[in-house]
Image (tube, rainbow, N blue to C red):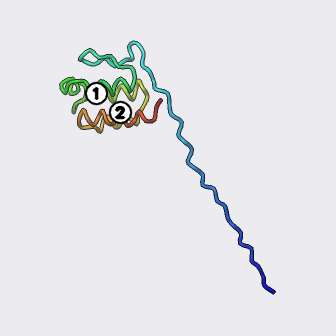
Amino acid sequence: MATTTKVKKSTTTTKRPAAKKKQPLTVAEGEKCFWACDGQILATLVDLEHALEQMSGETFMQHANSDKNDFAAWVEFVLEDKTCANGLRRARSQDQARTCVSKRLAFYI
């Protein structure tokens, strides 16, 4: 007499990490906007990204140099994004600052 063995199939489900909920962009209003020395008025990180693409190196250096970083201060205290502000402080060039802002925008909208 032959015996049969049942093989139990195991089913495992893999939990996918929950998608991180994107945050709404903070919009600065009125006097909380960033007023660049070249006349640009910025209200969001999107505005800052566009401004960093277009502004001259001289304008960038007026706001971000070894003595200060106006962009980082505005992002931290007005837009309340400390992560982006820290990245802006570490950026050593206008291009790096723009890249920092561009990457951070993935967490919004």
Number of other residues with Cα within 10 Å of mark 1, as a class: few under 14, some 14 to 19, many 20 or more? many
Residue 33 screen position, x and y as percent: 37, 17
- Looking at the image, which is closer to me, 41 or 46? 46
Q: Which residue is drawn at 40% across and 35% down?
A: 104
Q: In 3D space, how far apart are the residues under numbered discs 2 and 1 (Cα atoms)? A: 9 Å
Asked if the residue under mark 1 is in contact with the one under mark 2, i.e. CB atoms within 8 Å, the reply is: yes
Number of other residues with Cα within 10 Å of mark 2, as a class: few under 14, some 14 to 19, many 20 or more? many
Q: Residue at x 42, y 31 (%)?
A: 81
Q: Which residue lies furthest to the right in this view?
A: 1
Give above or below for 9 relative to 100. Answer: below
Residue 48 screen position, x and y as percent: 34, 25
- Residue to which mark 1 is pinned: 52
- Looking at the image, which is closer to me, 108 or 9? 9
Q: Quadrant of residue 67?
A: top left
Quadrant for the N terminus in the image: bottom right
Q: Earlier in the sequence, mark 2 or mark 1?
A: 1
Residue 7 screen position, x and y as percent: 71, 72
Circle 1 — which element?
A: helix
Circle 2 — which element?
A: helix
Q: Mark 2 belongs to which amino acid? A: Val
- Residue to which mark 2 is pinned: 101
